[in-house]
Image: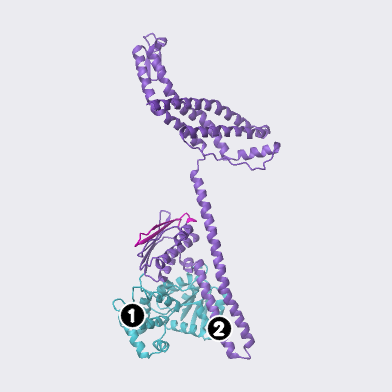
Amino acid sequence: MRVVLAEDLFLLRDGLVRLLEAYDFEIAAAVESGPELAKALAESSPDVAVVDVRLPPSHTDEGLQCALAARRERPGLPVLVLSQHVERLYARELLADGSGGVGYLLKDRVFDAEQFVDAVRRVAGGGTAMDPQVIQQLLSRRAADEPLGGPTPLTPRELEVLELMAQGRSNAAIAGQLVVTERAVAKHTSNIFAKLGLPVSDDDNRRVLAVLAYLDRDGR
Amino acid sequence: MGTRVRGAVVAGARGVVLAVAGLAGSITLFVVSVLSIALVPLGVGALATPSVLGLVRFWANRRRVAAAEWCGIRIPAAYRPLPPDVGGGPAGQVRRTRLVLGDPATWRDLRWLLVDMTAGCVTALLPAALMLYPLEGYAMAAGLWRAVTDGTHIGYWYAFVPISGQGSALLAALLGTVFLAVGMYAAPALLRAHFRVTRAALAPSDGELTERVRVLTETRRDAVDTSAAELRRIERDLHDGAQARLVAVGMDLGTVEALIEKDPAKARELLAQARRSSADALTELRDLVRGIHPPVLAERGLGDAVRALALRLPVPTEVDVELPGRADAPVESAAYFAVSETLTNAVKHAGAGRVWVDVRHSAGMLRISVTDNGEGGAVVGAGGGLDGIERRLGTFDGVLAVSSPAGGPTMVTMEIPCALS
């Protein structure tokens, strides 16, 4: 699997390269600035891009903007965005096109190599990997008077399932975590899709849309 | 009526005194001062100038006293005090000359001398003239006209009345009465006018500047205090948080080193613990960084930073931003933390269920309003959170207005003058 990697700190870039290579990824390019990233994405057509939000020369959200631009060129280009901080605002922008293949994780998640590599693979396969902190920002609002799902709000159990879904877990993984059967999870997910008014389409896409609806809960 | 007449006569008399003094005193002093200052390069002037200018100050102070006593007009004096260690002898005198000539008040005094001998003199004479000129008109009517004409030609002009006989002399008396009447009413006002002219020339013209200096001094002190307190807080947070955790990580790793061969299972356990500690340290650093300068603010500017902030609030918050560019980083930061504090207040203290934030820039002003549907009753002052916001904005000449009737809603409006880039 070919990876384009953009990270401006040498130590971190070097560490990521070694980590990914250890798990049999092929590093198509490892770059340190926004313009280089744009060039690498256009030229080497990778299977997945791992991108730091903040990149030189502007040291603003250059990496994120590059990734979004590349996805406009090539819809569904799998991008895993890493950052020192996570914001729902950015998560929403990444998911907004609804085509999946998006990840957004704190850099700390690299500490757990297995989970991190799993997230890269999931994103490369068109799934999502949202950092649990993004989800937590939402859960802190559970008490608010705006239950998700409109007239028929999601049950606490369904919210739990949605949260794990947002992190990019499969039904099997969710079932394992919540200690229920996979069939029960499938039932919950179809309830969630119904309550959020998501049309029947391929399951992966609906999962992304459900997460997007989740993130989009209260407008701007 | 009696008091009016007395007032007018007194004003006229004082005017005469001022006019005479203005002509005699001010002209003399001006000439002497100019000579003395002109002779400074020759040395003689350096010795005489402080005394001469001391006389000028004395003269100006007399006028200040008169203004206060006669018309209640206060003319502030703003002479720089001489330092106590100027010293005596010719060297001290030279130093004194330099100090006195460096004082803007000295040059204001000299300018006033010029004004006083011209405009000041005229305004001072007017009340007296209005009092005395009518007497001549009456004298004409009483027969003085015979001294200037034999009745066949115009022998004299009383103001704009040509005197050519008894008839026109009576007219002159009539005009004199008009002058007298005007003088009765206007003399005190004219005397005040004289002192206003004096004040315009003599008073430090920059009351506004003085006020500005006061405000700047105050806001600067606040800014220094605030940043010092912030630094203390950051130091404490680092010391008790991330720093302590990194020490723990180091210790754990050291123990792992010792155990790795004897007890691999225990070593693995400690490694996991070290990893957790480092993750915790990162979390703490992240929170700390957010408190110093939120990353979204650095990456996206005020608008998106406020949006991200709103997304973190436990209550639904609508954010409306209209910013065509970015403000300077310090202004952005001050505005962000002001909004953050206001939002915290709304959620914590007002128990708001909904919040609206509006951010826009127009006519050189960044305007932010935060409205909530909480219980209201917020006040500025008494060292509350709003006080802190006011001080924070004050550094940038920003202002804060709060409308918060009991029962709500609360609307906090902030304005900061700034340009966008």
In this rendering, is residue B42 above or below B214? above
**Chain ID of residue with mark 2:** B
Depth check: B54 or B359 in front?
B54
Residue farthest front in this picture: B2
Secondary structure state at the residue bearing disc 2: helix
Q: Which chain is cyan?
A: A
Depth check: B5 or B155 in front?
B5
Question: Does the image show residue A46?
Answer: no
How dense is the environment of label 2, judged by Cα within 10 Å: few (below 14), some, or many (20 and up)?
Answer: some
Indicate yes or no whether the magenta region holds residue B43.
no
Indicate yes or no whether the magenta region holds residue B398.
yes
Q: Which residue is mark 2?
A: B273
- Coloring applied to the structure: by chain
How dense is the environment of label 1, judged by Cα within 10 Å: few (below 14), some, or many (20 and up)?
Answer: some
Count every numbered label the image shows and give the total.
2
Secondary structure state at the residue bearing disc 1: loop
Question: Does the image show residue B192?
Answer: yes
The amino acid at mark 2 is: Gln
**Chain ID of residue with mark 1:** A
The amino acid at mark 1 is: Leu
Q: Which residues are magenta?
A: B394-421
Callouts 2 and 1 on one subunit: no
Give the residue at x 35% y 19%: B174
Q: Is residue B52 left or right of residue A121?
A: right
Report x, y in % for residue B122. 47, 27
Colour of chain B, in one word, is purple
Q: Which residue is mark 1?
A: A154
Give the residue at x 46% y 80%: A48
Report x, y in % for residue B185. 38, 28
Check if mark 2's residue and mark 1's residue have beta carbons within 8 Å: no
Q: Is residue A210 left or right of residue B64?
A: left
Where is the N terminus of chain B found, in terms of image quarters? top left
